Image (cartoon, rainbow, N blue to C red):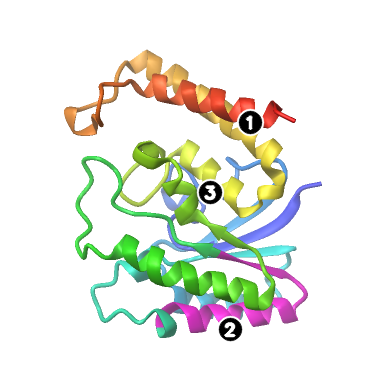
Amino acid sequence: MPIPTLAYGDSITADTTEGYAYDWCGARTSPELDCIPRGVNGERTAPGVARYLADLEADLVDAEYVVFAWGANDIRSPSAWDPAGAMLDPLESAVVATLDAGMTPVLWVPTPQYLTIGAPEDPYELANDRIEFELRPALEEMSNDYGIPIADQFGAIEAFGAEADMLYRDHVHFNGAGSEVLAATVLPESSLALGIAIGFTLLAYVFNAIARGTRKGAAYSRGPERTLATWELEQFAERLGAERSP
């Protein structure tokens, strides 16, 4: 039976009706994950938590899991960086309220940004360092303190190494394959169904890539010349083999 899940966050979690081609929470996720997206474009953690707590007070939150997928807009703030006041304190209040309501909160380590070849450079040269060296350790500590799940999306995307840019459709948002990776990281116990879903997603991209040839533009080349189809076939074979191994 699908796991009822609500996901609060920013444009990475916004419903497809908000103008984004893919979202990890919704139609492109596994049958194991019945996820309703409640993301708002451009939202930061503190106002997002306030919105969530208002929904909770109004009895509009009914799920087994509630994912708190903010952070992408906080870390890119040009103002004084205050992770405790801007993110961690509000998140902790949301965690406590969710546990008190008998549901399980899921923390979210924000995804890397400005990895895509040809995208604008990180204007502050700090976004990913803020995630890796400040937010992730603090969120892991909160996860341990409250005994709640954490989705390390930073690590999940970084694991793709030099090819991580192929999961993005711009310098922040994800394509279908990237969205499936995010979904798989939220509920890893659904890895078999999600692995199959990712495989079929990548396979569909392979056919599209074959149809259009090599990746567009010299700005997208990375090391030896490779086609998108070649990379996606390799990824598909690797994932499928891992799912079938005992």
Identify residue for label 3.
182
Q: Is residue 45 magenta?
A: no
Q: What element carries label 3?
A: helix
User: Secondary structure of the magenta portion, mostly?
Assistant: helix
Of the residues shown, which amino acid type is indicated by label 1? Answer: Ala
Q: What number is the disc on residue 195?
A: none
Q: In this view, does 148 lie to the left or right of 159?
A: right
Work out how far the residue at label 3 is from the one at label 1, CA to CA, in angstroms: 18 Å
* Residue bounds of the magenta highlight: 86-107
Q: Is residue 207 above or below residue 188?
A: above
Q: What element carries label 1?
A: helix
Residue 115 position in % (x across, y down): 30, 47
* Residue at (47% x, 53% y) in the render: 155
Q: Is residue 189 above or below residue 148?
A: above
Identify residue for label 2.
93
Q: In this view, does 36 lie to the left or right of 209?
A: right
Residue 125: name its quadrant. bottom left
Identify residue for label 1.
242
Of the residues shown, which amino acid type is indicated by label 3? Answer: Leu
For the residue pair 36 and 130, the one nearer the viewer reads as: 130
Work out how far the residue at label 2 is from the one at label 1, CA to CA, in angstroms: 39 Å
Counting residues from the start of the chain, the first of labels 3 and 1 encountered is: 3
How many neighbours does mark 3 have within 10 angstroms: few (below 14), some (14-19), or many (20 or more)? Answer: many
Residue 145: name its quadrant. bottom right
Which residue sits furthest front?
A: 246
